[in-house]
Amino acid sequence: MLQTSQSENPPDIHSVKSTSDVAGNEFLAFTLGKEEYGIDILKVQEIRGYEAVTRIANAPEFLKGVINLRGIIVPVVDMRIKFELGTPTYDQFTVVIILNISGRVVGMVVDSVSDVTTLMPEQIKPSPEMGTSFNTEYLIGLGTLDERMLILVDIDKLMSSEEMGLVDHTAI
Amino acid sequence: MTIDLGQFYQVFFDEAEELLAEMEKLLLAVDVSEPDMEELNAIFRTAHSIKGGASTFGIADMCDVTHILESLLDHIRKGEMTLTLEHVDAFLTAKDILKMQLNGHKFGAAVDQDAVGDVRMLLQSFAQNTAIHINAAPKLAKQVSQDDKLHYHHCFRVALPKVSATDLEAISAELGLLGHIAQEAIDHERFALVVETNGVADDIIAICSFILNPDDLTITELNNVVIPPPDEHENELGYGFFAPADAAVAESTIQTSATTETELGYGFFEPNNPDFALLRTPSEMMAGVEHKPSEHELSIAEHKQHEKVAKRDADKAAVNQETTTIRVGIEKVDQLINLIGELVITQAMLEQRTSTLDPLQHERLLGSIGQLTRNTRDLQEAVMSIRMMPMDYVFSRFPRMVRDLASKLNKKVEFVTYGAATELDKGLIERIVDPLTHLVRNSIDHGIETPEIRQLAGKNATGRLALSAAHQCGNIVIEVSDDGGGLNRDRILAKAVEQGLAVSDSMTDAEVWQLIFAPGFSTAEVVTDVSGRGVGMDVVKRNITNMGGVVDIRSAKGFGTTIVISLPLTLAILDGMSIRVGDEVYILPLAYVVESLQPVAEDVKEISGKGKVVKVRDEYLTLISMYEQFDIQPKFTDPCLGIIVILEVDGKRAALFVDELVGQQQVVVKNIESNYRKIQGVSGATILGDGGVALILDVSALLRSTR
């Protein structure tokens, strides 16, 4: 288990929340390649190190496979492959963010997790239209924090999208 | 104070459902010619409890029906009316109506108001018959009521607060059940009820609290207590019993009233033998005083009493058992099972890690690990047993069905069950109900003959249908057997030919019997609304196969048919064969594996350069390559170097080519779809000893994909 997983456990996050301003939203910041992203902290269940996955045949490349998370079978997606950012390497520093999206548990591989930040509504700017080069449908906006810019992802929408193929859309 | 009743509705629904099931069970068990007082009381109690619950929650329609039902039962219980078969039928119908109404409230299901009206009329007509009966002998009735009056030993004056006329009527009717009742006016709007009863003041409060706030009641015990003659204890026992809900309370009521009675007795007249009454338990006392005459008679009476007491003790035990259970959501249990599964894996890992240690140096650590292993195994067994339910849950719904079907088809059927205590996973129990129902219907409709035919064949006119369940080496074996006409081999074969199935006269009986599982197959000459349409047996077979079970038929012409269902004890565990292709491990459900072999090069042939077949004992089977299907980098691409596993689904075979067999093991089945979508060719996943995940192959989908 990684160092980060110890310091970023949900209990810590909640203790941060209690002292922070209620009007602000808390985001977990993580990096993919050189870019910094942020997701709603309340969707994060836990953070783990990367461990061997069981490959699923004929699945898209970004779907690494499934892992055993304390007895439940959880699919793991690699966001670096999905967003085509950097070269996916798997070593002891690779991090998996376990998300809980309306009851469904999904693992997301990222390069590293940095911190939890509180963003006031005025700190969140709408994302500009990127044309066809980038689909902004899954973005909440861009968060500014001093010199940093967080790309805020609507992880709920992204993970349940047809594009990710994690949910059986025909079955619903 | 207002309480939100909403949260209790579910409790009421559950409880009412159980009570209705209980009522049906009791009604079916009751001996019409010689009804047992205890049983009648029990039936009455169920009706009364449902009524109490329904009125608390303001469910008027159920309350209505139960009220009529209850009054009728009350007449019967008091012996004012003899129980007849028509009564039992009417009560069963009423039970069905109540069930329908309950479902109406629970799920918003449609309620057939005509049927409700019909059953009310039916019950009321019975009730009126008694009334006429009583009027015809008014003298006798009066005598009885006077006698009754003499026997009550408490008299309470219940001063009511201001209530509406209907409420007053309702309370009067309710209290009337306890004993004799009289109304007197306190002033314009308030009334007092004088209740003569054998119950205690608490009973009155309990009843009134359905309608009123108990704090508004003023209950005073009046002094004109009439001491019952000693030989009325029997009667007293009855009263003690049906007023309170459980036997334990009843017992104490008897005790108190008996003691009070003897104490009070001093003032009025010389009691026969105070020591006698004080020192012995009420039941013994009853036995002793019931009949004074001869010693012989006394001993008979005592014997009878002992029997009754024993029965009551058993009832009491049952009641106690009920109160020691708790309702727990199934997801909590599943979570527990998941956690235990994790614990078992962790424990296996620990065991594996420590196995390389020097036993001398680490003796104590290894000893503790051994202890942990045993504890974990015990814990796992204990937790798994929570999900287990007795087969009685399924069996208990059949007596009624058999009874109705048999009378509809003019057949006489004796229904027996064996091994109702055998336990099975709750998930499976719910899924076995439909197939079993179908088999039982079939047995009654097609299996058991009409009484005339049976007698001609020299058999007992009453057919016999048996349901049995037993554990057999890790499986549960459920049998539905009848002593009817048996399957007709010739007719099945003829029908099979007619339907274009591949048959030959040289088929074994077992093979012929399996034909009836073919879709659309029915040999019944007439299609009835019970069965015979030919849909069903294939569904039965499919349902059972889906549960990982097998169906077998044994039949002898003229002697009957037995259908044997063999099921794994739980859905959560599967017998698997682990196979390896490249670096990946997959699990094949063992139930589909026929054999495995290494083919020789000559037996592997290609068809038009695309598909491959393999010849196994003069039969060409499609060769499915795991590495192609699952896009794996294999160790071997030549089937002759690896191994092929012959799989069979629904009588169709295929050969699966894998690198090697790893071993056979029991695996815990995990659902993939709870967090991911369905994966083609995979039915589930399991966790291996090292904590990794292995996918379980969906063999039938695999075979379908090659067709």
Image: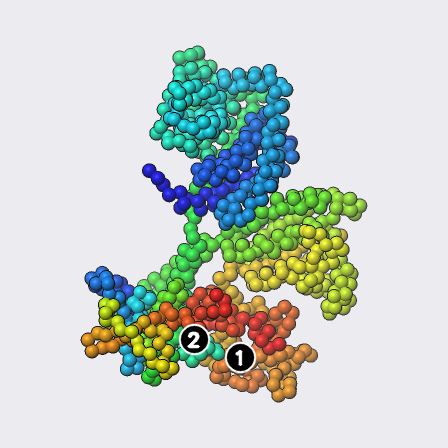
**x and y percentages locating residue B456 in the rendered image:** 80, 45
Q: Chain of mark 1?
A: B
Q: Is residue A45 visible?
A: yes
- Amino acid carrying label 2: it is Glu
Local crowd at mark 2 within 10 Å, few (<14), some, or many (≥20)?
few
Q: CA distance from mark 1 to mark 2?
A: 24 Å
Element type at mark 1: helix
Local crowd at mark 1 within 10 Å, few (<14), some, or many (≥20)?
some
Element type at mark 2: loop
**x and y percentages locating residue B259 in the rendered image:** 41, 22
Which mark, by number, is residue B476?
A: none
Q: Chain of mark 2?
A: A
Residue at 26% in and 73% down: A125
Give residue B160's quadrant in the image: top left
Which mark, by number, is residue B629?
A: 1
Residue positioned most to the top: B269
**x and y percentages locating residue B484 in the rendered image:** 72, 50
User: Considering depth in this image, is B492 or B552 the residue closer to the camera?
Assistant: B492
Side of B21 relative to A14 (left or right): right
Instruction: Say yes or no: labels 1 and 2 on the same chain.
Output: no
Q: Is residue A139 above or below residue B244?
A: below
Q: In this figure, which residue is indicated by the disc labeled 2? A: A163
Residue positioned most to the bottom: B609
Side of B208 relative to A10 (left or right): right
Residue at 64% in and 85% down: B607
User: Considering depth in this image, is B62 or B682 the residue closer to the camera?
Assistant: B62
Residue at 58% in and 35% down: B120
Residue at 68% in and 64% down: B518
Q: Is residue B378 visible?
A: no
- Amino acid carrying label 1: it is Gln
Label 1 vs label 2, nearer the camera: 2
